[in-house]
């Protein structure tokens, strides 16, 4: 899946019992910086964060 400006999206998952910050830190690590959140959801005890790295991060 891609954003309207052509950036690839990535999904990270973390336990529902933890904070969203866990998913956010994982996304920042993957991007090497900032990202745009595409969708956040909680399904079957798992937090899902779909995101795209900001263009200035080398992606």
Image (tube, grey):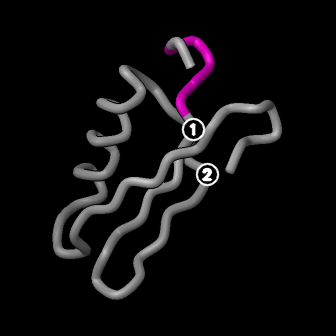
Q: CA distance from mark 2 to mark 1?
A: 7 Å
Mark 1 element type: strand
On the image, the x and y values in percent for residue 7 come to: 68, 32
Judge whether 36 appears above or below 55 on screen: below
Crowd rating for badge 1 (residues with CA inside 10 Å; few <14, some 14–19, many 20+)? many
Residue 30: give its label: none
Q: Quadrant of residue 19?
A: bottom left
Question: Sequence-wise, which precedes: disc 2 or disc 1?
Answer: 2
Q: Are marks 2 and 1 in contact (CB under 8 Å)?
A: yes
Q: Nearer the viewer, residue 44 or 8?
A: 8
Q: Residue at x 57, y 59 (%)?
A: 39
Q: Is residue 45 left or right of residue 56?
A: left
The residue tagged 1 is: 52
The stretch in magenta equals 53-57
State left or right for residue 31 relative to residue 14.
right
Who's the residue at 41% across and 65% down the image?
Answer: 48
Tell me: residue 39, above or below residue 22. Answer: below
Q: Residue at x 57, y 12 (%)?
A: 56
Instruction: Give the residue number, with chain letter if any, for mark 2.
Output: 38
Q: Position of residue 42 (x, y in %)?
A: 41, 77
Q: Classify 10 Å Cα crowding around label 2: few (below 14), some (14-19), many (20 and above).
A: few
């Amino acid at each position: 899946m891609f954003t309207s400006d052509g950036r690839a999206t990535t999904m990270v998952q973390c336990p529902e019992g933890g904070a969203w910050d866990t998913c956010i830190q994982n996304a920042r690590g993957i991007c090497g910086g900032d990202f745009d959140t595409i969708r956040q959801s909680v399904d079957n005890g798992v937090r899902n964060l779909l995101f795209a790295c900001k263009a200035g991060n080398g992606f």
